[in-house]
Amino acid sequence: MNCKRQKVYKGMKIGYILAFLLFLVACKPYADYKERGHWKQLKENERIGFYWRHNDKIYAALGDSAVLIKYVKPMEDVDIATFYVNKKTTNGMENYAKDKKNVYYPLHAICVDADSYGYEYATELIVKGAFPSSFRYVGDGKGTDGYTMYRYGRREDK
């Protein structure tokens, strides 16, 4: 083979490899799953499941409001303007939420029980790897961004 043909052959080979890789990346195996919930923006002092909005801060906790304000830190780096909670869940307390940066789920809840009060708060909240712009709740504790399926906030392998 002459030098010109080798360059053309090498260029075609690289082109085919890039096209194949693009196909793999663009493939959305969970794109057909339908949304089974309703995303709602929280109003001031409104609670949906684990999420409560107070003084333009979001708390991931359950319990008496006065106790939560005193003992629980609000979620960090939440974009309040784009924060939505999914109202439709299996048990009503394990809601997915999302803003423009992250998808949230109460992965790890801690219960505090004292003589005069008790509350629960979530620590691990960010669903790692989920794309919030395309994330949807599909039922039975599951959500998908089209690329990956998550169940109760954790990646579920096929």
Image (cartoon, grey):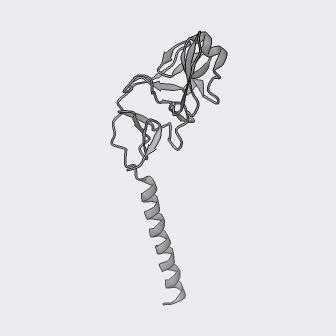
Residue 65 position within the rendered picture, expressed as x and y whole percent measured from the top left? 58, 11
User: In this rendering, would 57 be left or right of 42?
Assistant: right
Q: Residue at x 48, y 25 (%)?
A: 85
Report the label total: 0
Does any portion of residue 55 appear in the rendered image? no
Q: Residue at x 63, y 23 (%)?
A: 74
Image height of 115 relative to 61, above or below? above
User: In this rendering, would 34 be left or right of 75?
Assistant: left
Classify residue 79 by image quadrant: top right
Residue 124 position within the rendered picture, expressed as x and y whole percent measured from the top left? 57, 34
User: In this rendering, would 74 be left or right of 157?
Assistant: right
Residue 151 position within the rendered picture, expressed as x and y whole percent measured from the top left? 42, 38
Image height of 4 relative to 40, above or below? below
Q: Residue at x 47, y 21 (%)?
A: 49
Residue 17 or 107: which is nearer the viewer? 107
Residue found at the far front of this picture: 115
Residue 41 position within the rendered picture, expressed as x and y whole percent measured from the top left? 50, 21
Residue found at the far bottom of this picture: 1
Does any portion of residue 46 appear in the rendered image? yes
Image height of 59 relative to 11, above or below? above
Q: Residue at x 63, y 20 (%)?
A: 72
